[in-house]
């Protein structure tokens, strides 16, 4: 398959391996579900089908005759209010809105955990996903990747030891690295040490970067990447601390792709909850993200106040040039409070102010914005168990963008098995580096119905009126969005009757 | 979690001291009467023979109750002939007499053995009225109760209260070996300590282990099994089970929440204390499975609810305290990273993946988030790349929407800023992820590479080129021709 812009090229040898893994996962599912003689003691799982639709009006660069362009009061050449660039005496270039197109994506998930194969503590977990694109030629992200074994691992968990083999993820302060390999953890009292390693998969994808990003990204080295890492956790009472080190290298050891460490802390102290994290990029020798958050419940828990100090520095692997462009971090202070004077009323408010470090770049004309703020507030009112009203407002402005948005929703739950919602929203968005003021308002309805103990359906439809002014590509139109999801629980979990979906 | 009364099983009696009632039901003979007359239900019978009226006729009790001293059941009571010697229908009104029906009791009392003991210590024969008579009444004022102080004159009772701290077995058979009727079992008195605070949680278990026989006086194993999920524990199996024909009152299982369970942090700490001994009194393995998705030795050791009589405490899946915070969504990453074992208690990796790499259906982002995510993406309150691959997800969508860059220098998308090309450096360093969501690396190299149009170095003065070359020389070559620092890689 030829790579297309934004498209996804099918992997080669690794794709075959992936198919084998998937087939094994499916076989394990059926083995667990019912093959006589090897039957698992229990299988818990679900099948989910999701269909999403959105109408878009992409923008496109178009040519404009020079004689139709006029110079504005700011001295810039414009056509229909939008800034254009004239590339010759006769031709200028500018953006225009294309016609409406609807694109749809359908996703089919099968997830399950089976256990009890005659070996205590042995289980098998898998999440398989198939995707397809419907509607116009507009590509829904990743729908070119028709099938993925998102997860497929066997686990043996007995007492102090847990071993996993297969496709798995590590949830950590370094993100969600996924890999095909093994991990082992040993827990002794409050200590746990874990080691893991295997073939690394691209961030956010389920294929090695050299195959998944071929055609999508530049400078991709056609070599596999191996990931190794380890962590040590200490838990005492309600305090947990985990330190982690992780390294990714090319299979031929010709270079590092990533080398990072992190430390994460969460603790429940008397009257205070503390959490914090910090990561360090050994590859580029700099501190990455971090935060320290204190949460204090007051008024018998009716008021929760949180204060956070954050640092954010984007992380890029050493296999791209981005990290070597030396991004600067921002530091932010944020205060949040949530007040629930009664079970029927809840209010929350948060505000933050951030400041970016010195970019060290030449200043031409005047420096760009280097501070940002965000404020949000919301309220919830539950006049009775069947009704709920939510409202929220968010204001964000800083380098790159401005957003002022408000949402309101009414929820009606005539029974435990049915929830109907109506929602209205409005927002104004300005991109700092692009002319124009985009405004939108609209509303939608959604429903969530539990058809049986094991079957749940949800869906919704939203219509948003999109307008733009002030030089943006301007053509008001109504954007329709819709989605539906069907989820069927399967299996014979002994605790299923008492369990919510998880 | 639901604690409280749960109807189940059978219940056996109330108190340790069946003795009082049992003694009141004692037949004049009292020799294993329950087994001799299993059909009898004479517990509430009163003595039909008017002893007081006959006090002048009988100088000795053994005149009528000849079998008492020797334990001969046949002569415990007089025959009809003895009555008809006087009540012949001529001198005295004729009466019908068949003797009292021997009533079921749990009293363990043998007249011959007591008589023998008394003889051994040189005491006289039994004086019947000392136990059966009324010291303030006439000589033959035989009542329905025996006088316990007479028992205690030899069998020293450790407390003044008959029902407290006594060795019940001295005088009583285990309930399982009696034929007490249902009404009698229901009427068994309740010792005062059974109603005391903490009896259920703190006292009765240790007492039962220490004084099994005392419990057995009023209880059978079925009473334990009505509440205890782990009714097969040795302390319980040591208690005799009821015979099949012994009718027992219906039991009401009652569970109290231990103080430890309401402590802050119990939810996160309970695993360290979990074991069959600690948990199986109230919980079955299904209770663990309400939250735990995996088993461990402690969970596996618990009985299954299908295997036990007791209802146990039903636990329903519930969010831990941390999850109820309005801001949990923002904080959960650190909590998970600090101790992902806590998450793994209830969630498989599929749960995380469903959201972090799942189809959007109004879960994490608002439904129309795609339309208004620009400002938030610049602000980076969340790290987009936690879930999304910038190249395969962000850029592919931006390209489809016409926002993707083709690296041209013509129509500028960033038209709000004059001279953007030479001013973009600060914005790029402040929000490089946003740049990468539309631009490919090669577009930047067009100007920043050593072969580029402007050869503008993207590095700061502090940039450690040597270290970078050592870490990954391949990517240096994206912009540089050969080793930019000269010499070998090392």
Image (cartoon, coloured by chain):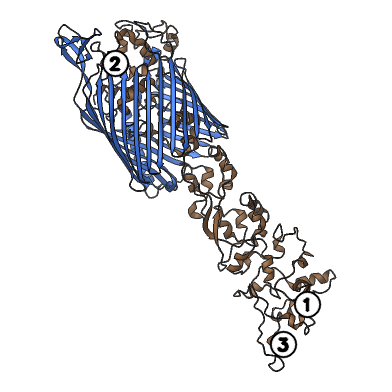
The disc numbered 2 marks a residue on which chain? Answer: A
Tell me the residue that label 2 is attached to.
A434
Residue beneath the point at 24% across and 7% down:
A75
User: How far is disc 3 from disc 1 in space, using C-alphas?
Assistant: 23 Å
As measured in the structure, the alpha-carbon distance from the residue carrying label 3 to the one carrying label 2 is 125 Å
Q: Nearer the viewer, mark 3 or mark 1?
A: 1
Give the image location of residue A446, x and y in percent. Answer: 30, 38
Residue to which mark 1 is pinned:
B138
Do the numbered discs 3 and 1 sit on residues whose CB atoms are within 8 Å?
Answer: no
Q: Nearer the viewer, mark 3 or mark 2?
A: 2
B288 vs A310: above or below: below
Judged from the image, the secondary structure of the residue bearing numbered disc 1 is loop
In the figure, the brown chain has which letter? Answer: B
Q: What residue sits 20% from the left and 30% below the top?
A: A136
Parent chain of label 3? B
Chain in blue, by letter, is: A
The residue labelled by disc 3 is B82
Q: Position of residue B202 (x, y in %)?
A: 64, 49
Check contact, mark 1 vs mark 2: CB within 8 A: no
């Amino acid at each position: 398959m030829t790579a297309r812009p934004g498209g996804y090229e099918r992997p080669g040898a690794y794709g075959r391996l992936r198919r084998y893994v998937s087939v094994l996962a499916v076989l394990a599912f059926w083995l667990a579900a019912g093959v006589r003689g090897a039957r698992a003691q229990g299988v818990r799982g679900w099948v989910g089908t999701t269909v999403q639709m959105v109408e878009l009006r992409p923008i496109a660069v178009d040519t404009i005759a020079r004689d139709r362009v006029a110079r504005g009061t700011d001295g810039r050449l414009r056509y229909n209010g939008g800034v254009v660039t004239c590339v010759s005496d006769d031709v200028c270039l500018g953006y225009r809105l294309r016609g409406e197109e609807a694109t749809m994506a359908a996703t089919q998930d099968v997830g399950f955990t089976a256990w009890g194969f005659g070996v205590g503590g042995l289980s098998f977990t898998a999440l398989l996903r198939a995707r397809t694109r419907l509607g116009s030629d507009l590509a829904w992200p990743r729908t070119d990747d028709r099938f993925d074994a998102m997860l497929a691992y066997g686990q043996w968990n007995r007492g102090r030891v847990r071993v996993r083999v297969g496709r798995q993820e590590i949830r950590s302060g370094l993100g969600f690295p996924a890999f095909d390999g093994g991990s082992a953890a040993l827990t002794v009292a409050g200590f746990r040490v874990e080691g893991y390693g295997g073939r690394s998969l691209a961030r956010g994808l389920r294929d090695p970067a050299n195959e998944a990003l071929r055609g999508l990204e530049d400078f991709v080295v056609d070599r596999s990447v191996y990931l190794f890492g380890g962590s040590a956790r200490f838990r005492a009472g309600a305090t947990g601390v985990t330190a982690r080190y992780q390294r990714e290298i090319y299979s031929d050891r010709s270079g590092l792709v990533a080398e990072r460490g992190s430390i994460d802390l969460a603790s429940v102290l008397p009257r205070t909850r503390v959490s914090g994290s910090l990561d360090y990029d050994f590859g580029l020798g700099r501190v990455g993200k971090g935060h320290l958050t204190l949460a204090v419940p007051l008024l018998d828990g009716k008021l929760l106040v949180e204060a956070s100090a954050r640092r954010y520095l984007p992380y890029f692997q050493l296999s791209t040039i981005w990290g070597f462009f030396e991004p600067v971090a921002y530091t932010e202070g944020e205060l949040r409070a949530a007040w629930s004077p009664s079970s029927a009323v809840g209010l929350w408010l948060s505000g933050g102010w951030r400041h970016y470090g010195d970019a060290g770049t030449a200043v031409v004309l005047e420096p760009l914005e280097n501070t940002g703020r965000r404020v949000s507030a919301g309220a919830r009112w539950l006049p009775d168990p069947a009704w709920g009203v939510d409202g929220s407002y968010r204001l964000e402005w800083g380098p790159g963008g401005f957003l002022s948005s408000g949402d309101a929703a009414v929820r009606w739950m005539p029974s435990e098995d049915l929830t109907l919602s109506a929602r209205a929203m409005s927002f104004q968005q300005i991109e700092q580096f692009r002319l124009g003021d985009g405004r939108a308002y609209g509303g939608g309805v959604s429903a969530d119905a539990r058809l049986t103990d094991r079957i749940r359906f949800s869906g919704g439809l939203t219509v948003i009126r999109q307008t733009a002014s002030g030089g943006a590509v301007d053509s008001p139109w109504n954007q329709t969005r819709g989605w539906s999801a069907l989820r069927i629980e399967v299996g014979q979990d002994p605790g299923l009757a008492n369990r919510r979906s998880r | 979690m639901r604690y409280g009364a749960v109807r189940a099983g059978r219940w056996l009696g109330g108190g340790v001291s069946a003795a009082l009632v049992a003694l009141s039901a004692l037949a004049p003979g009292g020799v294993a009467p329950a087994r001799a007359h299993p059909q009898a239900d004479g517990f509430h019978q009163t003595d039909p023979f008017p002893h007081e009226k006959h006090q002048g006729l009988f100088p000795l009790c053994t005149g009528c109750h000849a079998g008492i001293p020797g334990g001969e059941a046949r002569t415990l009571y007089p025959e009809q002939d003895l009555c008809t010697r006087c009540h012949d229908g001529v001198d005295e009104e004729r009466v019908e007499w068949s003797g009292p029906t021997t009533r079921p009791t749990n009293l363990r009392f043998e007249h011959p053995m007591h008589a023998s003991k008394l003889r051994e210590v040189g005491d006289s024969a039994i004086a019947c009225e000392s136990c059966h008579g009324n010291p303030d009444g006439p000589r033959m004022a035989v009542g329905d109760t025996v006088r316990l102080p007479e028992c205690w004159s030899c069998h020293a009772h450790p407390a003044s209260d008959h029902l407290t701290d006594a060795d019940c077995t001295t005088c009583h058979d285990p309930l399982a070996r009696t034929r007490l009727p249902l009404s009698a079992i229901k009427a068994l008195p309740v010792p005062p300590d059974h109603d005391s605070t903490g009896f259920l949680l703190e006292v009765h278990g240790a007492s039962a282990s220490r004084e099994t026989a005392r419990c057995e006086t009023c209880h059978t194993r079925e009473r334990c099994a009505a509440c205890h999920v782990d009714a097969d524990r040795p302390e319980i199996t040591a208690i005799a089970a009821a015979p099949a024909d012994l009718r027992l009152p219906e039991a009401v299982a009652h569970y109290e929440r231990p103080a430890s369970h309401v402590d802050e942090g119990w939810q996160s700490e309970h695993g360290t204390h979990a074991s069959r001994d600690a948990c199986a009194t109230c919980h079955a393995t299904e209770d663990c499975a309400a939250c735990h998705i995996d088993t461990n030795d402690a969970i596996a050791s618990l009985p299954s609810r299908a295997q036990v009589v007791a209802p146990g405490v039903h636990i329903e899946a519930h969010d831990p305290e941390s999850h109820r915070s309005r801001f949990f969504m923002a904080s959960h990453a650190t909590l998970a990273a600090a101790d992902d074992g806590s998450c793994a208690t209830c969630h498989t990796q599929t749960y995380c993946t469903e959201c972090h790499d799942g189809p959007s259906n109004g879960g994490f982002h608002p439904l129309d988030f795609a339309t208004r995510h620009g400002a938030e993406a610049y602000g980076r309150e969340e790290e987009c790349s936690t879930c999304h691959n910038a190249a395969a997800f962000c850029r592919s969508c931006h390209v489809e929407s016409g926002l993707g860059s083709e690296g041209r220098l013509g129509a500028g998308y960033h038209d709000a800023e004059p001279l953007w090309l030479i001013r973009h450096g600060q914005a790029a360093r402040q929000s490089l992820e946003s740049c990468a969501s539309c631009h490919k690396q090669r577009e930047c190299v067009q100007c920043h590479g050593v072969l580029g149009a402007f050869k503008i170095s993207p590095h700061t003065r502090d940039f450690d080129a040597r270290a970078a070359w050592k870490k990954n020389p391949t990517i240096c070559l994206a912009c540089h021709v050969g080793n930019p620092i000269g010499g070998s890689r090392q």
